[in-house]
Image: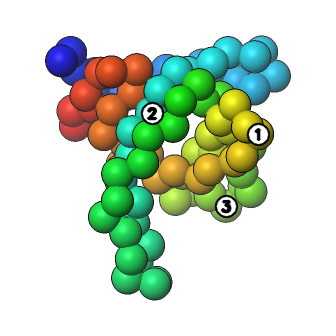
Amino acid sequence: MTTIFYSDLLKLIDAADHKGGAVIGSLVYLKCNRTKKTGGEWVKLENVQKCGLPFHCKDHEMRGFKDATGKVTPVHLRLIYEINNMQVTP
């Protein structure tokens, strides 16, 4: 499996915008919720696009991703494990 650096991951995500119709591809991340003390499940999203979230989420290193069904999923960037079959390394 090939790897991608975290800095290149950010460039890839920020270059793909929902206005331009650019599809990122597949995304694998780990769920985590500190307030509810839940998480630990791996989630795979297919054919995702970057979409908007409330402004305060960007300060917490979160981005929104919309799948083919139109469902928006907020994802913390540090919890992304794999994008387009490339493993993310720090």
Quarter occupied by the C terminus: top left
Does residue 65 show up? yes
Look at 59% across and 53% down and name the residue there.
74
Q: Label 2 vs label 1: CA separation? A: 15 Å
The reply, left or right, for residue 9 in relation to residue 21 is left
> Which of the labelled discs sits on residue 70, or is there none?
1
**Helix, strand or loop at disc 3?**
helix
The reply to whether callout 3 and callout 2 are in contact (CB within 8 Å) is no
Q: Label 3 vs label 2: CA separation? A: 23 Å
The reply to whether callout 3 and callout 1 are in contact (CB within 8 Å) is no
3 or 1: tag closer to the N-terminus:
3
The reply to whether callout 2 and callout 1 are in contact (CB within 8 Å) is no
Q: Amino acid at mark 3?
A: His
Q: Residue furthest right?
A: 19
Query: Where's residue 84, x and y in %?
Result: 40, 20
Q: Is residue 55 above or below residue 89?
A: below
> Which of the labelled discs sits on residue 27, or is there none?
2
The reply, left or right, for residue 54 in relation to residue 8 is right
> How many residues crowd mark 3 within 10 Å: few (<14), some (14–19), many (20+)?
few
**Helix, strand or loop at disc 2?**
strand
Q: Nearer the viewer, mark 3 or mark 2?
A: 2
Q: Is residue 18 above or below residue 53?
A: above
Look at 76% across and 39% down and name the residue there.
70
The residue carrying mark 3 is 56
Q: Label 3 vs label 1: CA separation? A: 22 Å
Q: Amino acid at mark 2?
A: Leu
